[in-house]
């Protein structure tokens, strides 16, 4: 079995290939490229872990500190994919904590902030060859809140398409059913706690097209004396960073968000929602890791075990 990791940065597409023929004991290193360097480590000796797609595993990696290393001033991020193809084609996002493509009944995972209103519908995407489902929120609707709870430090990613006339579509974190305080990334790139006007960051993004898909990503991480809130907006193919925002919040102040749920803001169509650990998406040091199970590779469990991991690091957002 062969595993590869690719990183797409400013320098282009880079591939890492195992130094040996087998994954057990083989270190993964760059074959070519001149962008950010990252190396996936083999399973720990005696741990019983593997990198097989249909078994439980832990992905561990290190970054190389040199002239071509990660430039932390530009807030690098990693997006993890898997694909059965050596050329990277047919890639799919890995699932580490949560994924919803709205194939199950909506009330199995979500509840409206106002159950008396019918602001959300699951529809078949018109013209979709596979009959893909989308979640549609009315432009003036109320938020949709998850039934599941999540740890404090994570990133929520939503693929969305703004609806004509909508202004406050987007995603929310540390939300609660009975409290409007939360961290949200909404509209034309506004990062805020709607219950505290002082906690806000805004960098206007021009030219959002209601007919196009985008990725809205919002992450929160608690630290000593402060909470880091970081957001990014990507194009619909997740190839280009369109905007990056960040802010610090002081815990304990009035209306500080303390919820454990995520929220979707009405006014857009949504096709996929993912939740990942903060450390899987935002490298904060020279090494990192995250755990996965067979759910990480949803289609691999019933098919071939020749699945690959593929990641990407973005080094700089356009100004």
Image (spheres, helix red, strand yellow):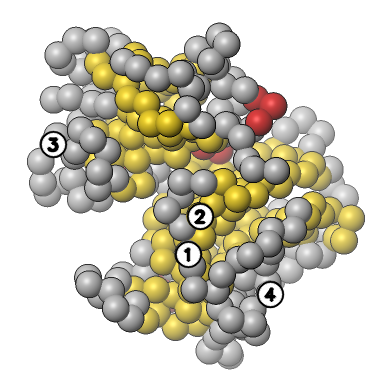
Give the camera-side residue of 41 and 34.
34
Q: Which residue is mark 4?
A: 167
The C terminus, quarter of image: top right
Q: Is residue 296 left or right of residue 289?
A: left
Indicate the secondary structure of the residue bearing disc 4.
loop
| Residue 250 image label | none
Q: Which one is in front, 53 or 311?
A: 311
Contact (Cβ within 8 Å) of mark 1 with mark 2: yes
Q: CA distance from mark 1 to mark 4?
A: 15 Å
Residue indicated by mark 1? 213
Decide which of tag 1 and tag 4 comes sooner along the chain. Answer: 4
Q: Quadrant of residue 99?
A: bottom left
Q: Is residue 73 above or below residue 165?
A: above
Report the Cα–Cα distance between label 4 and label 2. 18 Å
* Mark 3 or mark 1, whichever is nearer to me: 1
Q: Sequence-wise, which precedes: disc 2 or disc 3? A: 2
Label 1, label 2: how far apart the Cα atoms are:
7 Å
């Amino acid at each position: 079995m062969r595993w590869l990791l690719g990183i797409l940065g400013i320098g282009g597409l880079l591939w890492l290939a195992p130094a040996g023929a087998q994954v057990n004991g083989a270190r993964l290193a760059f074959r070519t490229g001149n962008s950010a360097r990252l190396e996936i480590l083999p399973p720990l000796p005696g741990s019983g872990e593997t990198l097989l797609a249909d078994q439980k595993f832990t992905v561990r990696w290190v970054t190389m500190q040199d002239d071509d290393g990660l430039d932390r001033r530009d807030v690098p991020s990693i997006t993890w994919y898997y694909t059965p193809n050596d050329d990277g084609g047919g890639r799919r996002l890995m699932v580490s904590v949560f994924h919803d493509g709205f194939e199950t009944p909506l009330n199995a995972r979500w509840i409206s902030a106002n159950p008396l209103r019918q602001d959300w519908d699951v529809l078949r995407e018109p013209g979709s060859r596979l009959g893909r489902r989308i979640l549609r929120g009315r432009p003036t609707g109320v938020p949709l809140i998850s039934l599941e709870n999540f740890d404090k430090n994570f990133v929520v990613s939503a693929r969305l398409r703004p609806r004509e006339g909508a202004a406050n579509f987007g995603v929310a974190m540390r939300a609660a059913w009975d409290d409007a305080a939360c961290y949200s990334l909404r509209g034309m790139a506004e990062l805020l706690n709607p219950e505290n006007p002082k906690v806000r960051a805004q960098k206007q993004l021009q030219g959002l097209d209601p007919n196009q898909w985008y990725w809205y990503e919002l992450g929160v991480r608690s630290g000593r004396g402060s909470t880091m809130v970081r957001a990014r907006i990507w194009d619909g193919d997740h190839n280009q960073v369109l905007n990056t925002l960040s802010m610090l919040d002081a815990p304990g102040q009035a209306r500080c968000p303390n919820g454990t749920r995520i929220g979707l803001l009405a006014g857009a169509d949504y096709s996929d929602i993912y939740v990942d650990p903060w450390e899987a998406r935002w490298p904060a040091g020279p090494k990192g890791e995250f755990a996965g199970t067979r759910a990480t590779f949803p289609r691999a469990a019933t098919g071939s075990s020749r699945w690959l991991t593929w990641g990407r690091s973005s080094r700089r957002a356009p100004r």
